[in-house]
Image: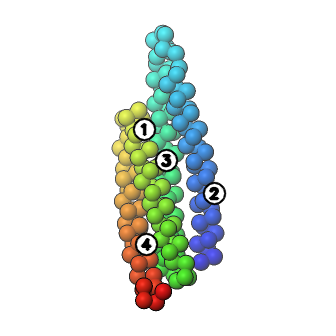
Amino acid sequence: MRDVEREGDAIRRELLELAAADARAFEGYRAAMKLSQRTPEEIAARTKAIVDAALTAAQVPLRTAEACVRALELARTAAESGNENAVSDAGVAGWLARAGAEGAALNVKINLPSVSESERPGLAGRADRALERARALHEAIVERVRQRMPSPAAV
């Protein structure tokens, strides 16, 4: 469990960094949307800036969703092998990581229309795979936590 704790702490730090990166990506997208459109050159520059900013705005939450999957993998380990008296904490971690993955995938998908067509399938596919894995891991965690929780008569 010490390895799980160490890896969990690394993922926590990564997710905090990704939250800050997501805010920066959003600001970059907003700035691109505000660029001047007075000349054909400005319109072209603005369009390129929007597409570039949208790519970043999709990539950051994609990395977030994938980090949440790694957190779910750790929560599953804790649910299976962790202290029985703290198994509910593994369940809470599973719910939070699932919510993070779901939310991050929504943020990927909302940015896809502004991303270049060549990038969309790869981003969407990775987001879908992360969600599929997150949902499966979450189900396994919830089931294992329920199995390991003390029965009401024992409480």
Query: Which quadrant of the figure has residue 25?
Result: top right
Decide: is 25 above or below 149.
Answer: above
Q: Are marks 3 and 1 in contact (CB under 8 Å)?
A: yes
Which residue does the numbered mark 3 point to in the structure image? Answer: 61
At numbered mark 2, what does the secondary structure look like: helix, strand or loop? helix
Q: Position of residue 22 (x, y in %)?
A: 55, 43
Q: Amino acid at mark 4?
A: Ile
Decide: is 74 above or below 61.
Answer: below
Give the CA separation, mark 1 to mark 2: 25 Å
Earlier in the chain: of badge 3 and badge 1, it is 3
Q: Residues within 10 Å of mark 1 (few under 14, many from 20)?
A: many
Q: Residues within 10 Å of mark 3 (few under 14, many from 20)?
A: many
- Image point (51%, 72%), residue name: 90
Q: Residues within 10 Å of mark 2 (few under 14, many from 20)?
A: few
Earlier in the chain: of badge 4 and badge 1, it is 1
Decide: is 92 above or below 66.
Answer: below
Of badges 4 and 1, nearer the viewer stands 4
Is residue 49 visible from the viewing direction of this image?
A: no
Which residue does the numbered mark 1 point to in the structure image? Answer: 111
Q: Are marks 4 and 1 in contact (CB under 8 Å)?
A: no
Give the CA separation, mark 3 to mark 1: 10 Å
Give the CA separation, mark 4 to mark 1: 30 Å
Is residue 149 visible from the viewing direction of this image?
A: yes
Q: Amino acid at mark 3?
A: Pro
Give the CA separation, mark 3 to mark 4: 23 Å
Earlier in the chain: of badge 3 and badge 4, it is 3
- Image point (46%, 16%), residue name: 43
Q: Position of residue 34 (x, y in %)?
A: 52, 22
- Quadrant containing the N terminus in the rendered view: bottom right
Q: Disc number at residue 141? A: 4
Q: Disc number at residue 13? A: 2
Give the CA separation, mark 4 to mark 2: 23 Å
